[in-house]
Amino acid sequence: MNTTDKKTLFVEMRARGKSYSTIAKELQISKSTCTKWNYDLENAIENLKSEIFAELYEKYQMGRQARIERYGREIEKIDEALAKVDYSQVDPVKLHELKIRYLTLLNNEYREPLSLSEAMS
């Protein structure tokens, strides 16, 4: 493996949080080389970290949207059940507790997303 390839892998590994020890062993370089490359390639490492973070952030947001939709569907089902329930036979407290739990989960999911710079700090 040539030096350029090693530097490319170094940037990827540092952006993903790998330690100098791990990188040095895997790339068969010294820790002092890791220190020098880290200094020389700091901008590339930070740019890749930002790209990785942005991808994860996007993935998380999609996950959040799916959870919000699922919680909303569950709340609708609970509302339908509450509308039909004969309170003399079913403890309404149980259904209300379940509704409150889903409303809380939904409320926790709905918040303005952080900007990339806010999330990084």
Image (tube, rainbow, N blue to C red):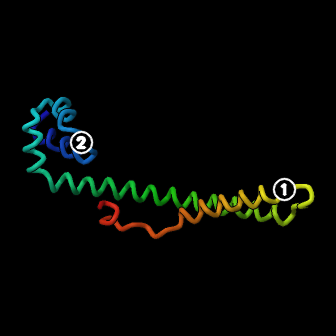
Quick check: 54 left or right of 61? left
Quick check: 15 left or right of 59? left
Q: Where, by quadrant of the figure, is residue 70 drawn?
A: bottom right
Quick check: 99 left or right of 7? right
Q: Secondary structure at mark 2?
A: helix
- Amino acid of disc 2: Met
Q: Position of residue 46 (x, y in %)?
A: 21, 55
Q: Secondary structure at mark 1?
A: loop
Q: Which mark is residue 110?
A: none
Which quadrant, please, contains the N terminus? top left
**Residue at the (46%, 70%) spot, across then down:** 112
Q: Where, by quadrant of the figure, is residue 59 drawn?
A: bottom left
Tell us which disc is closer to us: 2 or 1.
Answer: 1
**Residue at the (65%, 58%) spot, across then down:** 101
- Amino acid of disc 1: Asp
| Crowd around label 2: few <14 · some 14–19 · many ≥20 (10 Å) | some
Which quadrant, please, contains the C terminus? bottom left
Q: Position of residue 117 (x, y in %)?
A: 30, 65
Q: Where, by quadrant of the figure, is residue 89 drawn?
A: bottom right
Which residue position holds label 1?
A: 91
CA–CA distance between discs 2 and 1?
56 Å
Q: Earlier in the sequence, mark 2 or mark 1?
A: 2
**63 shown above or below 107:** above
Quick check: 18 left or right of 106? left
Which residue position holds label 2?
A: 13
| Crowd around label 1: few <14 · some 14–19 · many ≥20 (10 Å) | few
The residue lying furthest to the bottom in this view is 112
Q: Position of residue 102 (x, y in %)?
A: 65, 59
Between 44 and 84, the one lying in front of the other is: 84
> Are the two marked residues, 2 and 1, in contact with CB atoms closer than 8 angstroms?
no
